[in-house]
Image (cartoon, rainbow, N blue to C red):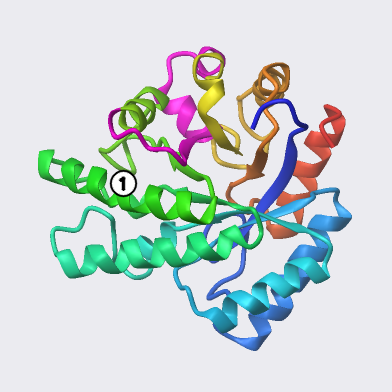
């Protein structure tokens, strides 16, 4: 991911980002998806990040065609809705549920491979409750997912999430340790400015320490609004990444505040004003 130019995308999902309730569950939501993609293109974004809870081939094919039709690239495929909507996680003590979660991640990995997109593993790890057994199950599940990613020549971006969302892997160092311990070949680190602001003692130092392993990066301000609406100096973080030669995707994963269109426009204005796009 080093030596190239950063590319910028925006999340469109039934959750964070450009928010479309029950996305891909009705014809109307596909129309709104097209509208969202057109807006991203108009505002200067080159990619879109999705968060999917299904691996229906017909739906995935239609989504792929829509993104290509609107002249964008699929930057990343998030998997958090597998947990948020279906209640499946990579750490579930019920082996049948855990296997369903793993199978869905593997199917989305295959989908991502056709577009050279990153696969994100974040909230699909499960919720707050934590113990040694859950961590062991998470390690086992990640080994399986990493093996599938290697087969499909896809990168997994394992996200460091803040302590209020999970008890597993809150910092970049936590993620790096797991990747090292399990010798994961196709897994890197996903860092998010919102989570880093809570967990990292120095955000810039963290970027410098782990830059070789950063596979994907999320931006949102301290209040999870678009950049410029909180107290984070996101432009400084992006300049550090630029200086370090980061050539992966940077996606805006934020609350659609004050509304979808304004969130996209405000983020694009911020990036243009600092000459990133």
Residue 102 left/right relative to 12: left
Task: Please tell me in which quadrant of the rendered image residue 132 appears.
Answer: top left
Q: Secondary structure at mark 1?
A: helix
Q: Which residue is mark 1?
A: 143
Residue 176 left/right relative to 247: left
Q: Camera-side residue: 108 or 39?
A: 108
In which quadrant will I find the N terminus?
top right
* Picture coordinates of residue 255, whole percent (x, y): 58, 50
* Picture coordinates of residue 273, whole percent (x, y): 86, 30
Q: Camera-side residue: 275 or 76?
A: 76
In which quadrant will I find the C terminus?
top right
Q: Residue at x 64, y 77 (%)?
A: 61
Q: Camera-side residue: 204 or 19?
A: 204
Residue 187 covered by magenta stretch:
yes
- Say if residue 198 shows up in the picture: yes
In the image, residue 62 sits, relative to residue 208, either above or below, namely: below
- Say if residue 50 shows up in the picture: no
Look at the image and give the residue range highlighted in magenta: 181-206
* Picture coordinates of residue 19, whole percent (x, y): 61, 63
In the image, residue 185 sits, relative to residue 69, either above or below, namely: above
Near mark 1 (Cα within 10 A), the count class, few <14, some 14-19 or many ≥20, is: some
């Amino acid at each position: 991911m080093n030596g190239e130019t950063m590319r910028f995308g925006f999340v469109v999902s039934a959750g964070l980002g450009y928010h479309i309730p029950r996305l891909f569950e009705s014809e109307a939501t596909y129309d709104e998806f097209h509208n969202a993609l057109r807006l991203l293109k108009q505002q200067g974004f080159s990619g879109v990040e999705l968060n999917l809870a299904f691996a229906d081939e017909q739906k995935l094919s239609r989504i792929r065609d829509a993104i290509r039709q609107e002249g964008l690239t699929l930057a990343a495929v998030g998997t958090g809705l597998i947990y948020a909507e279906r209640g499946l996680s990579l750490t579930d003590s019920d082996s049948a549920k855990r296997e369903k979660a793993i199978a869905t991640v593997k199917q989305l990995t295959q989908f991502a491979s056709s577009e050279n997109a990153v696969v994100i593993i974040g909230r699909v790890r499960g919720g707050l409750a934590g113990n040694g057994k859950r961590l062991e199950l998470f390690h086992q599940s990640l080994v399986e997912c990493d093996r599938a990613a290697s087969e499909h020549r896809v990168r997994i971006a394992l996200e460091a999430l803040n302590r209020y969302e999970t008890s597993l892997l809150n910092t970049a160092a936590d993620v790096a340790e797991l990747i090292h311990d399990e010798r994961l070949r196709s897994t890197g680190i996903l860092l998010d400015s919102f989570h880093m602001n809570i967990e990292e003692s120095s955000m810039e130092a963290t970027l410098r320490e782990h830059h070789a392993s950063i596979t994907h990066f999320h931006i949102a301000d301290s209040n999870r609004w678009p950049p410029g609406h909180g107290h984070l100096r996101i432009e400084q973080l992006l300049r550090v990444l630029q200086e370090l030669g980061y050539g992966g995707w940077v996606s805006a994963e934020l609350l659609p505040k004050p509304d979808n269109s304004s969130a996209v426009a405000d983020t694009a204005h911020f990036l243009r004003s600092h000459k990133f796009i």
